[in-house]
Amino acid sequence: MEQLSDSDHRDSADATTSSCQSTTAEDGQCGGGEAMARGLSAMLESVIKDFDSKALDTLNSQDQLSGSLDRLVQELDQLLENAPLPFIVQHASRISSVKQRVSSLNLVLKSVQRRIDNIDHMLSANTTQEKASSETT
């Protein structure tokens, strides 16, 4: 995914603000506060989408890692049944510990993803509401 720099975010916010400033106050399209709100909304929307994409990529990677660890734990369990050497038991316990930490991290990532989705939904609803109210005035 294309990554936007801070200056790109500022440029998009500046473009929104300057386009609103070029209209007259009598047009009723942009007020000082509305221009700033639209600029911030545009900037936050792109930041949230970028973060959301990276969070999804991380979540997918964590799921793949979890699946690989599950497979490895199963293979080690089979190996332990056939040859219970202290060396193997030690490494099996380490891998089980890593698996538990990855599972815990996945739960945290899913919680963060839900929160980001909620924020995105609230911003989208607010933007839609602002557009509707500015069209009626």
Image (cartoon, rainbow, N blue to C red):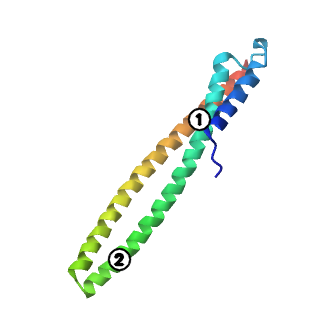
Amino acid type indicated by mark 2? Gln
Name the side, left or right, on which 8 lies relative to 108.
right
Mark 2 vs mark 1, foreground winner is 1
- Residue at left 78%, top 19%? 22
Name the foreground residue: 117 vs 36: 36
Disc 1 packing (10 Å; few <14; some 14–19; many ≥20): some
Looking at the rendered structure, the secondary structure element under dot 2 is helix
Residue 117 locus on image (x, y percent): 53, 43
Q: Which residue is mark 1?
A: 44
- Residue at left 64%, top 35%? 7
Residue at the farthest top position: 26
Looking at the rendered structure, the secondary structure element under dot 1 is helix
Vertical placement of residue 13 versus 73, above or below:
above
Name the side, left or right, on which 80 lies relative to 64.
left
Whether residue 124 is visible to the viewer of this picture, yes or no, is: no
Residue at the farthest left position: 86
Vertical placement of residue 52 versus 75, above or below:
above
Query: Rounded to the nearest whole Å, what is the CA distance between mark 2 and mark 1?
Result: 44 Å
Report the quarter where the C terminus lies: top right
Amino acid type indicated by mark 1? Leu
- Residue at left 54%, top 51%? 54
- Residue at left 64%, top 43%? 4
Disc 2 packing (10 Å; few <14; some 14–19; many ≥20): few
The answer to which of marks 2 and 1 sits earlier in the sequence is: 1
Residue 129 locus on image (x, y percent): 64, 28
Q: Which residue is mark 2?
A: 74
Residue 48 locus on image (x, y percent): 57, 41
Residue at the farthest bottom position: 82
Total of numbered circles in the picture?
2
Whether residue 80 is visible to the viewer of this picture, yes or no, is: yes
